[in-house]
C-alpha cells in the first residue's frame, strides 16, 4: 500500500511538471526520493516497534501527505511563473520547507513509538498533560500581538523566521487529559438527575467540567480570535463525554451550550460578525472579506466533476491556497471526484482509528483513540465545510495536506499514538501457560476421608 501511494504521488508530480513546464526538472527526482526514503523509514519503524498495528493507517497518512506535497509544488510553480512574468526575484518555494517539516515529523513519530511502549502510561500524566495543554492554548493570547498575531488571529509564537502554533499540540495534550479524567470520574458523569422528555439529565453540580470546557472555548475565541480552535476543542470534549457516558442528554446539553455561545460571540465580537457575513453572502463584499470565499467557489465551479487536471487550473488565485484553502485547490484541479477520493482517505483513516478504539481492551485506550480519531474527522469537516461555504471560515488547516510545520508535527504525534493503541488492540493474547503434571510415581499421596 505504501508502494501504491508512492506510485500515485510520483505520477502526480510528473503530471504537474509536464502541464506547467512541459519538461521534467531535476527537482522531481529529489522530491520523489525524499518521499520514498521518509515513508520507508516510517514503515520499518512501525513494523519493528508496533508490529501488530493497523496496516492501513500509515499508508493513508503517506498518501495524504504526498498529495499535499504535490499540490504545494504545483502552487510553487505558479508563484515562480508569476514572479518571472513581472521580473520579480524567483521565490524559494514552500516544498523544500514542507519536506524538511515532514522529515522532522517522521523523526518525532518514530521517537514517540520508542518512548511510549504502552499507551496506558499516559493516563498517569493526565493532569500534567491538562495543565500543559491549557498553558499552550492560552499562551499566544497572553503575548504581545507582534509575536503571536497573524491575519488577525493570535495563535502563533514567532521568533525571527520561525513560527509555531502551540494550539496544535495543546489539542493532543487535552485529549489525553480528558480521556484520563473521564476514566477516573466516570461515575460522576453517569449519575442520573431529573428526567425531562424521556432523557435523564445530569445533576447541575456534575455539569462543571462541560461548563469549564465551554468557558475555555469562549476564552480562546475572545483572546485569540480563533474560531476554529474553540470549535474543535469544545467538540472533542463533548464527544468524549458522550462516549464515556453513552447518554444523549450530554449531547443535547452540549449543543445547547454551543448555540448559546455562538449567539453571544456573534453579538459581542466584530471578527465573528465579519466571518458570518462573509459566509452568508461573500459576494456582497467581494473585494474585501468575501474575496477568499468567492475565489474558492469560482475554483470549485471551474473544476466541476473531473477537474481541470493537475497543473491546468488557477488555484493560485485563491489566497492561502497552500494552507487554509488547499482543499479548494484540489477540488479545482482534480474535481469533485478527486476531492471525494481525498475525503474518502480521511474517512478511512478516521474509521480505522475508531476501530482501534472499539478493539482495545482498556477504557482509557478506548477514549484516547476515539478522541484522536474524532479530532481528525472534526478538523476535516470544519476545513472542508468552510471552503465549500457550508459553515463560516475558521482558519484551520487540512491535516497532512496543508503547508505548515506545527500541523504536521502534531498530527504525526497523533498518528503515532493511534498506531500504539492499534498495536495493543490487535496484539494476540498470550496463551495460557500449562504446567507439566508430575509423573504418577512422583505424585504426592493424598488422604481422602470416605464419608460415613
Image: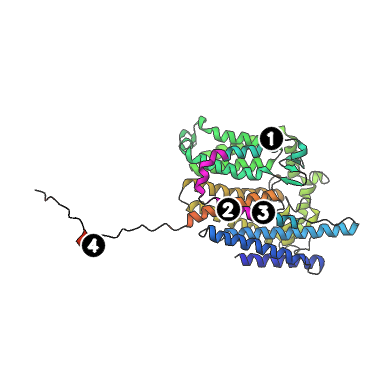
Q: Nearer the viewer, mark 1 or mark 3?
A: 3
Is 192 or 28 nearer to us in this picture? 28
Disc 4 or 3, which lies upstream in sequence?
3
The range drawn in magenta is 102-128
Disc 4 or 1, which lies upstream in sequence?
1
Task: Name, please, the residue furthest toward the bottom.
Answer: 23
Task: Name, please, the residue furthest toward the top.
Answer: 205
Q: Nearer the viewer, mark 2 or mark 3?
A: 3
Q: Is residue 429 left or right of residue 297?
A: left
Q: Position of residue 144 (x, y in %)?
A: 75, 35
Residue where numbered disc 3 is placed: 104
Disc 2 or 4, which lies upstream in sequence?
2
Quick check: marks 4 and 1 in contact, CB under 8 Å?
A: no
| Disc 1 secondary structure class | helix
Residue where numbered disc 1 is placed: 265
Residue where numbered disc 4 is placed: 439
Q: Is residue 142 above or below residue 358?
A: above
Quick check: marks 4 and 3 in contact, CB under 8 Å?
A: no
Disc 1 or 3, which lies upstream in sequence?
3
How many residues crowd around disc 3 within 10 Å: few (fewer than 14), some, or many (20 or more)? Answer: some
Quick check: marks 1 and 3 in contact, CB under 8 Å?
A: no
Task: Name, please, the residue furthest toward the front.
Answer: 442
Disc 2 or 1, which lies upstream in sequence?
1
Quick check: marks 2 and 3 in contact, CB under 8 Å?
A: no
Residue where numbered disc 2 is placed: 416
Is residue 241 visible in this depiction of the protein? no
- Residue 118 in the magenta stretch? The answer is yes
Amino acid at each position: 500500500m505504501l508502494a501504491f501511494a508512492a506510485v500515485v504521488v510520483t505520477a502526480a508530480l510528473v503530471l504537474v511538471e509536464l502541464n506547467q513546464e512541459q519538461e521534467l526538472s531535476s527537482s522531481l527526482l529529489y522530491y520523489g526520493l525524499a518521499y520514498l526514503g521518509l515513508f520507508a523509514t516510517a514503515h520499518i519503524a512501525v513494523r519493528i516497534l508496533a508490529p501488530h498495528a493497523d496496516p492501513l493507517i500509515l499508508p493513508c497518512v503517506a498518501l495524504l501527505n504526498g498529495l499535499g506535497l504535490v499540490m504545494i509544488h504545483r502552487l510553487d510553480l505558479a508563484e515562480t511563473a508569476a514572479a518571472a512574468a513581472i521580473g520579480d526575484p524567483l521565490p524559494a518555494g514552500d516544498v523544500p520547507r514542507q519536506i524538511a517539516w515532514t522529515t522532522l515529523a517522521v523523526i518525532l513519530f518514530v521517537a514517540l513509538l520508542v518512548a511510549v511502549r504502552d499507551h496506558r502510561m499516559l493516563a498517569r500524566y493526565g493532569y500534567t498533560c491538562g495543565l500543559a495543554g491549557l498553558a499552550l492554548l492560552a499562551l499566544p493570547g497572553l503575548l504581545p500581538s507582534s509575536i503571536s498575531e497573524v491575519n488577525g488571529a493570535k495563535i502563533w509564537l514567532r521568533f525571527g523566521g520561525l513560527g509555531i502554533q502551540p494550539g496544535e499540540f495543546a489539542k493532543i495534550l487535552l485529549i489525553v487529559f480528558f480521556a484520563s479524567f473521564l476514566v477516573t470520574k466516570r461515575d460522576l458523569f453517569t449519575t442520573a438527575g431529573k428526567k425531562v422528555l424521556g432523557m435523564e439529565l445530569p445533576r447541575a453540580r456534575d455539569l462543571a467540567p462541560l461548563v469549564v470546557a465551554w468557558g475555555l472555548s469562549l476564552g480562546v475565541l475572545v483572546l485569540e480570535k480563533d474560531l476554529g480552535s474553540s470549535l474543535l476543542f469544545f467538540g472533542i470534549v463533548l464527544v468524549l463525554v458522550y462516549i464515556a457516558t453513552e447518554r444523549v442528554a450530554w449531547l443535547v446539553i452540549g449543543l445547547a451550550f454551543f448555540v448559546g455561545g455562538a449567539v453571544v460571540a456573534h453579538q459581542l465580537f466584530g471578527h465573528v460578525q465579519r466571518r458570518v457575513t462573509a459566509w452568508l453572502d461573500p459576494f456582497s463584499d467581494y473585494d474585501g472579506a468575501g474575496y477568499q470565499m468567492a475565489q474558492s467557489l469560482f475554483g470549485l465551479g471551474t473544476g466541476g466533476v473531473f477537474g481541470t487536471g493537475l497543473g491546468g487550473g488557477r488555484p493560485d488565485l485563491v489566497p492561502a491556497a497552500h494552507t487554509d484553502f488547499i482543499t479548494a485547490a484540489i477540488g479545482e484541479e482534480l474535481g469533485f471526484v478527486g476531492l471525494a477520493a481525498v475525503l474518502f482517505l480521511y474517512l478511512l483513516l478516521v474509521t480505522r482509528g475508531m476501530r482501534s478504539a472499539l478493539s482495545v481492551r482498556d477504557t482509557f485506550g478506548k477514549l484516547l483513540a476515539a478522541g484522536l480519531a474524532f479530532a481528525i474527522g472534526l478538523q476535516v469537516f470544519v476545513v472542508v465545510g468552510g471552503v465549500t461555504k457550508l459553515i463560516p471560515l475558521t482558519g484551520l488547516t487540512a491535516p497532512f495536506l496543508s503547508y505548515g510545520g506545527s500541523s504536521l508535527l502534531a498530527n504525526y504525534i497523533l498518528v503515532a499514538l493511534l498506531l500504539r493503541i492499534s498495536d495493543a488492540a490487535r496484539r494476540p493474547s498470550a496463551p495460557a501457560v500449562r504446567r507439566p503434571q508430575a509423573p504418577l510415581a512422583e505424585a504426592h499421596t493424598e488422604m481422602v476421608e470416605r464419608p460415613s
